[in-house]
């Protein structure tokens, strides 16, 4: 099982500092992969589980990177989340219990809007590749990023909306 954490170069240092202290991360570092968008100047020594990319597509940095670099992970399924999420001590046990039950699943039970957090498989990403790639961006202008934010809100959770919930 792989956990893909979508991040951005601006927020990654503080997000990584927080996540790297979590027991779930400490005990399972090899299962975490950070994809850090908006990395126009690559920093050295971030670790083997950190990928830096110029893709600056907010919630879609990781998904777009995976679509463009399909060999990045060998797993067919993965858990996709944001660097703003916390991981409790029992995160991997709880996720492992559900992981094999679903091909895809959204995190939240009550809200249909999942902020794109959930279990994905490569087949689902490929099926939605055209829609996902509409969010492709490498521009760092405020205007472009605000436009993307608006588009993401208008299209919230289109990938997992019809998927069952994990909780």
Image (cartoon, rainbow, N blue to C red):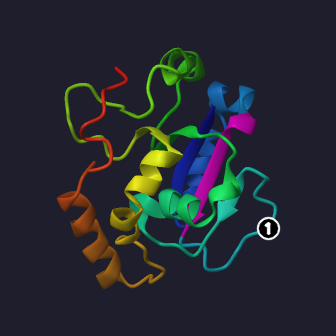
Q: Which residues are magenta?
A: 29-37
Residue 65 in the figure: left or right of residue 153? right
Which x, y percent locates residue 19?
A: 60, 40
Closer to the camera, 17 or 51?
51
Closer to the camera, 59 or 46?
59
Identified at 50% across, 41% down, the residue is: 121
Mark 1: which secondary structure? loop
Which x, y percent locates residue 161?
A: 25, 41
Position above or below: 62 against 68: above
**Quadrant (top left/top right/bottom left/bottom right) for the N terminus:** top right
Which x, y percent locates residue 76?
A: 59, 40
Identified at 61% across, 79% down, the residue is: 40
**Residue 31 forms part of the magenta stretch:** yes
Identified at 51% across, 24% down, the residue is: 99
Closer to the camera, 21 or 70?
70
Give the quadrant of residue 25. Answer: top right
Position above or below: 83 against 13: above
Q: Which residue is mark 1?
A: 44
Residue 135 in the figure: left or right of residue 81? left
Which x, y percent locates residue 145?
A: 34, 75
**Quadrant (top left/top right/bottom left/bottom right) for the C terminus:** top left
Q: Residues within 10 Å of mark 1 (few under 14, many from 20)?
A: few
Position above or below: 11 against 54: above
């Amino acid at each position: 099982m792989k956990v893909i954490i979508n991040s951005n170069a601006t927020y990654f240092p503080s997000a990584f500092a927080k996540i790297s202290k979590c027991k779930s991360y400490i005990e399972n570092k090899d299962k975490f992969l950070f994809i850090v968008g908006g990395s126009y100047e690559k920093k050295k020594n971030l670790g083997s589980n950190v990928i830096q990319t110029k893709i600056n597509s907010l919630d879609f940095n990781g998904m777009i990177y995976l679509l463009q670099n399909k060999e990045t992970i060998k797993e067919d399924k993965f858990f996709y989340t944001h660097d703003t999420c916390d991981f409790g001590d029992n995160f991997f046990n709880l996720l492992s219990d559900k992981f094999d039950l679903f091909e895809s699943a959204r995190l939240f039970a009550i809200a249909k809007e999942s902020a794109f957090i959930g279990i994905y498989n490569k087949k689902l990403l490929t099926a939605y590749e055209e829609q996902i790639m509409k969010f492709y961006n490498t521009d760092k202008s405020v205007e472009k990023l605000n436009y993307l934010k608006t588009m993401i809100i208008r299209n919230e959770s289109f990938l997992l909306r019809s998927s069952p919930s994990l909780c």
